[in-house]
Amino acid sequence: MIVIDGSHGEGGGQVLRTALTLATVTGESIRIEHVRAGRKTPGLRPQHLTAVRAAAAVCGAHVEGDALGSQTLTFAPGDQVSPGKYTFDVAQVAQRGSAGSVSLVLQTVLLPLALINGESHLTLRGGTHVPWAPPASYVEHVFLPLLRRMGIRARLDVVRWGFYPAGGGEMRVRINGRKGPLHPITLTDRGKLERVWGMAAVTNLPSHIPQRMANRARNVLMEADLSAQIEARRLQGAGPGAGIFLFTEYASSSNGETSVAGFTAYGRKGLPSERVAEAACEDLLTHHRSHTPVDPHLADQLVLPMVLAKGESRLVTPRVSQHLLTNVWVVRQFLARNVIIEERPDTPAALIVKE
């Protein structure tokens, strides 16, 4: 049994999710101690417990310690991963309304289901667009398109948006599983900017709010000589919420492939819509000026597919995040892959995975 210290690195849910994914894929039993010890409220919260139960469901695992607040978890996978139809509801696990991220639940089981023959259909309920997690729009337009280049075939549809704190969102995912290792990927050459686009969206709020976010974002980007197509959307949801989701798409001059990066900012009571738009634009412009193909958030999400691919993969990103370092550490507890992080002052960082 592999014993994982959940307080390592950023000491949050990343350790748990990465360990669950690798245990499910490899069949290794694990014991995670000090779960989320680095957080203000340690132990399993609703979204983490949902991820545990999702991983257990797809591989028939025997689990001990799967309760809200638990800081120790034992997870022994069954004989194999089973494709099929699954529904995972964070609010049901919380036994109340919850905006726990369904994107993080998806990322826990996506690779195991993608690496087994058969089609899977997931219904995920909870928070689709919440802080401190990849919004569903980012997963749909940035993460999954890059995974397709590695051989993962998955499609995501947002049925109902769920902002923090009310949640109440739903997304559905179809995964066409396949046997065999993933294809390696190289993301070192960004190429020419093809387009900037996105959406400003609200639930249960007046229509002038997304319009103000969209207008301000277009103006900020225009001042930086970037033309952007930004849609203003007013939606119905379980509660009020607001956010802007921007994307940049680049075409590599070396291989003709496109790379997409995403940038998000959320509204909150008392914060003007224009400030929300400016925050997302600032992140976008910082990345654009870095001349690197992979934003820091995507870099840590690509660690797992890269180590499960055959051959050498590499990417370049502006900086190394604590999540990236934590993910690499967890991988080294399971796999004998040569994972290298090259980081030098005043230069972009590189992540390289070798046999």
Image (cartoon, rainbow, N blue to C red):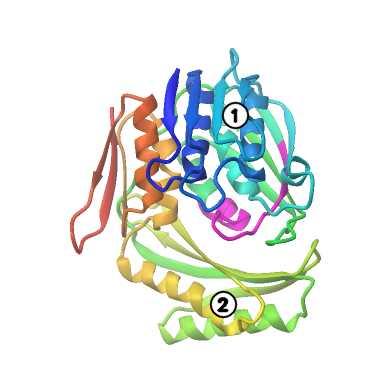
The residue at the point 63 percent across, 35 percent down is: 175
> Residue 176, image x and y in percent?
62, 32
> Which dot, 2 or 1, sits closer to the camera?
2
Residue at 43% across, 87% down: 223
Give the distance between the C-alpha atoms of the residues marked 2 and 1, in whole angstroms: 36 Å
Q: Residue at x 78, y 53 (%)?
A: 97
Foreground of the two, 340 or 193: 340
Name which quarter of the figure residue 191 lies in.
bottom left
Quadrant in which the N terminus is drawn? top left
Circle 2 sits in a helix, a strand or a loop, which is it? helix
Looking at the image, which residue sits at the far top? 79
Residue 140: in magenta span: yes
The residue that mark 2 highlights is 276
- Lower position in the chain sequence, tag 2 or tag 1: 1
Mark 1 — residue?
Answer: 113
Estimate the x, y position of residue 263 in percent, counting from the top left: 50, 65
Q: Which residues are magenta?
A: 122-142
